[in-house]
Structure formats: C-alpha cells, structure tokens
Image (cartoon, helix red, strand yellow):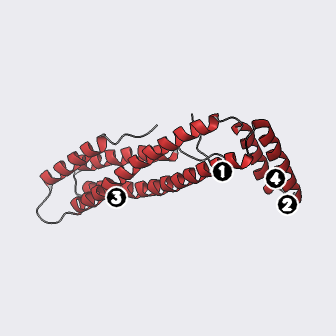
Amino acid sequence: MRFQYTWIPILLLILASGGCATLPVGSDEAQVRLIEANVALGGLQDRIEQLYADMETVRQDLAAFYQEPGWPEMRQIILTVLSAEGSEDDDTNLQTVAETATDEWASRWGEPWEDRFAEYLGMVRRCTALEARRIALQAELFGVQGKFLGVSVANYSRGRYEQGMASDEVVELLSRSAEDLGSYSLDEVGLYEVR
C-alpha cells in the first residue's frame, strides 16, 4: 500500500533542468517556487519513509499481540466498557460489569487482566503517537502539493507548458502519496488493523 517516491527525484530533475533551459536571466517566480517546493519535499520524503518503517514495526507487534490468548475476549470487554461509558448507566453498574468481566477473563486465561491490559495500553500509546505523526505528515504533504501547484501556475502563466505539466505530474504523485497516508486509521479500540 505504501507509495514509492522513486519517480519524484526524476521528475524534480526534469523540472529543474527544463526550467533552467528556458529561464530568462534574473529571478523568475517559477524557479523560486520550484526551489521552495523542492526544499519542502526533501525533508518530507525522509520523514514519510520513517513513518512507514515505524508503522510496519508496530503492525508486526500488533499481529503478535492479536494472536495472544484471550485478546478477542479482552477486546470485547473493552468495547463493552467503552459503549457503557457513553450511555446513562451509573458508574457503580459500569464498575460492577467491568470487574465481573475482568475476573472471568483472568480465571479463564490464567493470567492477571492488568498485565494484558497494560500491554494493550502500550500498543494504544504507540498507535496514537504514529497516528499523530501520520496526520501531521499528511497535512504537510498537502502543503508541499500546494507549492508544486504554484510552480505549475507560474510556468503556465509564462507559457512554459512542458514545465507546468512536469510539475503537475509531481502534484499527482503527491496526491497518491497523500491517499496512501490516508488509508491508515485506528479502529474502535485505538489500534491499527492488521491484514
């Protein structure tokens, strides 16, 4: 599912070399915008690749966590408690339901509920941190995409259609990358799905 950036450096090289061949002497708005867009994209690519690597690590850890005995039952208890918290049940009734369910879980699986629940909370923290990074990078990616759109507009307004189209190709690649980043989301218990 991960978007590969292999074409972006090639397109940036085409943009820069094509732009330089037809640029008049002096400062040119399209060239300035291209430089700004390239600088913004440079660091972003590395951070997105690192995010994907970190997500893959978490997804592997989640796959192992989901295989642990009792996780489906614990997940159901968590969902029950979460849904009860949103209702108008009193706190005493909710606490009784939670205590009964966790005691039954512990006796069935032969380990303390709190230990497995602590593992779950650790996974939730990791997923939440990744989700915050993912959303921030996606927003930054939209900003970089806007910069390349500015490059396109500046080139088209100067009659440089090839450079404008080349910049539009980068915009399209960035759009697909944003879609890839948008394909990740947390489930109802705060964890990433593992397929």
Distance from disc 4 to disc 3, alpha carbons, whole Å, reads 47 Å
Q: Which residue position holds label 4? A: 84
Task: Identify the secondary structure beneath mark 2.
Answer: helix
Q: Which mark is residue 91?
A: 2
Distance from disc 3 to disc 1, alpha carbons, whole Å, reads 44 Å
The amino acid type found where label 1 is placed reads Ala
Relative image position of residue 124 (x, y in whole percent): 61, 51
Q: Could you say which is closer to the camera, residue 40 or residue 127?
A: 127
The amino acid type found where label 4 is placed reads Ala
Q: Is residue 190 left or right of residue 153?
A: right
Q: Is residue 96 visible?
A: yes
Q: Which tag, 3 or 1, sits closer to the chain's start? A: 1
Task: Identify the secondary structure beneath mark 1.
Answer: helix
Q: Which tag, 4 or 1, sits closer to the chain's start? A: 4
Q: Which residue position holds label 1? A: 118
Task: Identify the secondary structure beneath mark 4.
Answer: helix
User: For the residues carrying marks 4 and 3, which lies nearer the camera in this image?
Assistant: 4
Q: Could you say which is closer to the camera, residue 108 or residue 41?
A: 108
Q: Is residue 187 left or right of residue 98?
A: left
